[in-house]
Image (cartoon, grey):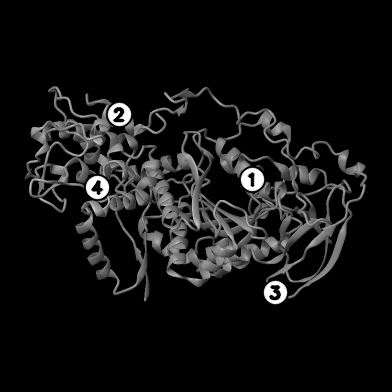
């Protein structure tokens, strides 16, 4: 039996780093004193067995009295311990024990109490019959595999005393499992909530940035065969723009496998999309492992990229305001119905990211009179780099779009209940509400309909609902007909790449209460899955030369549609098309054109159409090359504003040494030996 279990929590924590630091410092100060600390063995001496005096070679078991190790599955320990602390006082004054005392707070409860119990097994090892017992290496390796992501999320190195090879032993050496009782309790708890089989647990609460990073990395670790995380860049304040990928071959583009992306939290105060994408990542991982055939088919045939938060800096501002308004001492509290239309919307530079992309739509409108003007892969004009403050988040997403052959995309927003599709900028600059279709109007309408129709309420005609003005339109609208703006991300996707992006407005409340998160997941889950499946429509194929080599950058054009797409590195392409008869042409510089008449029946979602092009001399079109700025698509960031590297501080071995992370003050202010072993690349 397979059970899907959803756990919805009601408590929310929006603790800031400052508040956490204050709490932990108080705790550490109560543990630290001013007396001098006797010399103890170094980790190197401990590992080589040089720590004990002849008298100490006979361990004496003593009762376990360490406060943070009271729940270990044994009652007696001994000193010196495995890493060389000679006494209880020596241990309690060490940074290792201080770390165990605060690890729950540092990792936001992740991997707790596993890490603490594992650490206790080394710092206060089991003693039986006056013999020191070492913990099992397999227990250490299991915890490290599932928890290393939590340390990476806060830029902390894996603690040296949890080195699985140095301080843990194999079963053949008579080890014990320090997590045995914990596992037994977990099995009993799981048995109580599921009578048998496997289950998926998703906690429907809000997540801080560090919790989000941890969940994404934990998910990728759990499903390492089909998933990985990667960063597309950093925010203004240096936070990772962390994405998670799902594919049957993560990290690689498979020939003819389409790629899609989902983006949330572009506006920091529009948070529902961020949470839905976190839940979606967990759902895809767990359901794939559970054998859900639909999810397995999606992941095995599609490469999915999920960026839950494009604006983590703005999210922190919005989340802190919600926390303030939930404070019972705040007489003006409004709970989650706060003034979310402005607070946290922009990034840390106060830039609206959905107005910060190059305005390629104006170029499209101004140059339609040229006979051979292309409406695809329009280059970024140099004036954009000269005259606009480009946010690092915008730059990162533009590079991301240019780096992967995305076919479709959805950007999740809040404030209305509707699907908006390009163009977002009006074809008449003075008209703020003018229907402004792209050459792919019918494709965009079908893409928008797919999400809206699968959503629980978006396409109904209830005029009392949120987004009532769109009820008679089935929950979809042309962006410029709703309201016009330039510099949007969806228009940029369409005009600069092969990607068709829609904007999903998830509801009127930009920051709904936690009680609404689970119902919103139920409303949107099927829509998200249906949207991902939509990518397998139209035609796909490979453009090759006479020798069977794929041709990169060949254009695929459809008669009657003035918008071409181009082939990827290996010559493969994906062209969204509605059912019907189409004339499709493949062309590339230096090759002959080849056209094919295809019939795409309604019963076939995607058809295979390959092309073989012959090498021939080809004269360039004068009309095309007389249009300025259209022959420099690869000229991106021409003034090297973002690629310039700042001076790096080098460590002892020449590796990059980074600025110390926020948690360093927990230890540096206590007078103990600074635990530089917690710093990565130090």
The local crowd at label 2, few if under 14, some if 14 to 19, many if 20 or more residues have their Cα within 10 Å, is few
Specify whether 608 is left or right of 194.
right
Specify whether 53 is left or right of 482.
left
Q: Mark 3: which secondary structure?
A: loop
Residue holding disc 2? 665
Give the mark nearer the N terminus: 4 vs 3: 4
Residues at discs 2 and 4 in contact (Cβ within 8 Å): no
Residue holding disc 1? 403
Query: Which mark is in front, 4 or 3?
Result: 4
Residue holding disc 3? 604
State the residue at coordinates (21%, 53%).
176
- Name the mark on residue 120: none
* Residue 207 position within the rendered picture, expressed as x and y whole percent measured from the top left: 38, 49
Q: How far apart in space, not on screen, are marks 1 and 4 (Cα)?
A: 42 Å
Q: How far apart in space, not on screen, are marks 2 and 1 (Cα)?
A: 39 Å
Residues at discs 4 and 3 in contact (Cβ within 8 Å): no
Give the mark nearer the N terminus: 3 vs 1: 1
Asked if residue 260 can be seen in this view, the reply is yes
Which image quarter is the C terminus in?
A: top left
The local crowd at label 4, few if under 14, some if 14 to 19, many if 20 or more residues have their Cα within 10 Å, is many
- Name the mark on residue 118: 4
């Amino acid at each position: 039996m397979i059970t899907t279990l959803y756990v919805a929590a009601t408590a929310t924590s929006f603790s800031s780093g400052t508040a956490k630091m204050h709490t932990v410092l108080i705790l550490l100060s109560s543990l630290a004193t001013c007396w001098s600390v006797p010399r103890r063995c170094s980790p190197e001496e401990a590992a080589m067995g040089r720590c004990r005096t002849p008298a100490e070679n006979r361990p004496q078991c003593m009762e376990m009295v360490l406060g943070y190790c009271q729940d270990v599955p044994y009652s007696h320990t001994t000193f010196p311990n495995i890493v060389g602390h000679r006494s209880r006082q020596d241990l309690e004054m060490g940074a290792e024990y201080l770390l165990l005392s605060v690890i729950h707070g540092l990792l936001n409860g992740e991997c707790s109490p596993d890490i603490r119990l594992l650490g206790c097994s080394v710092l206060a090892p089991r003693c039986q019959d006056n013999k020191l017992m070492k913990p099992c290496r397999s227990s250490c390796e299991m915890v490290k595999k599932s928890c290393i992501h939590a340390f990476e999320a806060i830029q902390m190195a894996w603690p040296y005393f949890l080195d699985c090879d140095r301080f843990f032993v194999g079963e053949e050496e008579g080890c014990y499992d320090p997590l045995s009782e914990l596992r037994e309790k977990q099995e009993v708890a799981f048995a109580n909530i599921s009578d048998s089989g496997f289950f998926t647990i998703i906690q429907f609460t809000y997540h801080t940035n560090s919790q989000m990073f941890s969940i994404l990395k934990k998910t990728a670790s759990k499903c390492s065969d089909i998933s990985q995380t990667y960063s597309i860049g950093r925010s203004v304040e240096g936070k990772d723009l962390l994405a998670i990928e799902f594919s049957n071959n993560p990290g690689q583009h498979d020939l003819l496998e389409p790629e899609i992306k989902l983006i949330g939290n572009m506006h920091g105060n529009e948070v529902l999309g961020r949470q839905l994408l976190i839940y979606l990542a967990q759902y895809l991982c767990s359901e794939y492992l559970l054998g859900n055939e639909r999810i397995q088919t999606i992941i095995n045939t599609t490469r999915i990229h999920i960026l839950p938060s494009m604006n983590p800096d703005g999210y922190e501002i919005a989340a802190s305001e919600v926390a303030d308004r939930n404070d019972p001492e705040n007489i003006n509290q409004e709970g989650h119905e706060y003034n979310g239309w402005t607070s946290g919307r922009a990034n840390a530079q106060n830039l609206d990211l959905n107005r910060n992309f190059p305005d390629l739509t104006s170029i499209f409108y101004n140059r339609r009179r040229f006979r051979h003007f292309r409406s695809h892969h329009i280059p970024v004009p140099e004036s954009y780099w000269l005259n606009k403050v480009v946010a690092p988040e915008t730059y990162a997403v533009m590079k991301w779009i240019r780096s992967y052959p995305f076919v479709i995309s959805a950007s999740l927003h809040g404030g209305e209940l509707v699907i908006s599709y390009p163009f977002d900028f009006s074809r008449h600059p003075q008209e703020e509400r003018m229907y402004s279709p792209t050459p792919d109007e019918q494709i965009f309408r079908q893409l928008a309909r797919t999400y809206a129709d699968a959503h629980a309420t978006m396409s109904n005609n209830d005029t009392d609902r949120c987004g009532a003005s769109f009820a008679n339109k089935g929950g979809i609208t042309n962006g410029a007909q709703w309201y016009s703006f330039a510099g949007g991300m969806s228009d940029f996707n369409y005009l600069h790449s092969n990607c068709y992006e829609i904007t999903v407005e998830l509801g009127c409340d930009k920051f709904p209460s936690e009680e609404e998160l689970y119902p919103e997941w139920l409303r949107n889950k099927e829509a998200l899955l249906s949207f991902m499946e939509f990518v397998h429509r139209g035609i796909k194929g490979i453009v090759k030369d006479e020798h069977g080599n794929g041709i990169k950058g060949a254009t695929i054009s459809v008669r009657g549609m003035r918008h071409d797409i181009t082939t990827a590195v290996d010559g493969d392409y994906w062209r969204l098309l509605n059912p019907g008869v189409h004339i499709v042409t493949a062309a590339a510089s230096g090759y002959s054109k080849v056209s094919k008449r295809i019939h795409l029946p309604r019963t076939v979602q995607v058809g295979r159409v390959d092309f073989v092009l012959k090498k021939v001399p080809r004269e360039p079109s004068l009309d095309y090359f007389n249009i300025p700025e259209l022959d420099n698509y690869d000229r991106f960031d021409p003034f090297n504003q973002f690629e310039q590297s700042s001076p790096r501080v080098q460590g002892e071995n020449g590796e990059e040494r980074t600025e110390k992370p926020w948690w360093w003050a927990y230890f540096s202010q206590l007078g103990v030996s600074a635990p530089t072993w917690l710093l990565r690349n130090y």
